[in-house]
Amino acid sequence: MPMTLTWDIVRASGLAAYVMVTGAVILGQLLSLRVQSPTHWPRLFNYTLHQHVLLWAGILTLVHGMSAWLDPFMRFRWY
């Protein structure tokens, strides 16, 4: 892979994971505060959305870590 492609993947996946984690925290707070009304935003949908956002945040975090490990410029090591 070209060096710029891995660098772009590192940056994009890191930013996307950060946005997803922020969204998951906000959805979790809305779930705990019970702010939504059942007619406009059902609680089950909100909980499912919260779980999916957390799942994608975890996947993007793994993509971020693996692409940083593969990037030849950063020389990221596990130790």
Image (tube, rainbow, N blue to C red):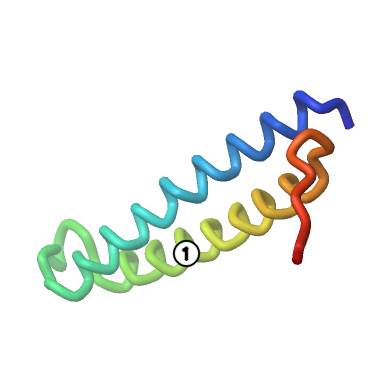
**Which corner quadrant of the image does residue 40 belong to?**
bottom left
Which residue is painted at 60% across and 43% down in the image? Answer: 13
Q: Residue furthest front?
A: 79
Side of 64 where 17 appears, left or right: left
The vertical placement of 39 against 66, above or below, is: below
Quarter that holds the C terminus: bottom right
For the residue carrying disc 1, how many other residues have a C-alpha within 10 Å: few (<14), some (14-19), or many (20+)?
A: many
Side of 22 where 1 appears, left or right: right
Q: Which residue is mark 1?
A: 54
Q: Residue furthest right?
A: 1
Which residue is painted at 76% across and 63% down in the image? Answer: 78
The vertical placement of 5 against 78, above or below, is: above
Across and down, in percent, residue 33 comes to: 12, 72
Which residue is painted at 67% across and 29% down in the image? Answer: 8
**Which corner quadrant of the image does residue 11 belong to?**
top right
Q: Amino acid at mark 1?
A: Leu
Q: Does dot 1 land on a helix, a strand or a loop?
A: helix
Quarter that holds the N terminus: top right
Which residue is painted at 69% across and 51% down in the image? Answer: 63
Side of 7 where 58 appears, left or right: left
Across and down, in percent, residue 47 comes to: 34, 71
Across and down, in percent, residue 5 comes to: 77, 28
Across and down, in percent, residue 31 comes to: 22, 71
Q: How many marks?
A: 1
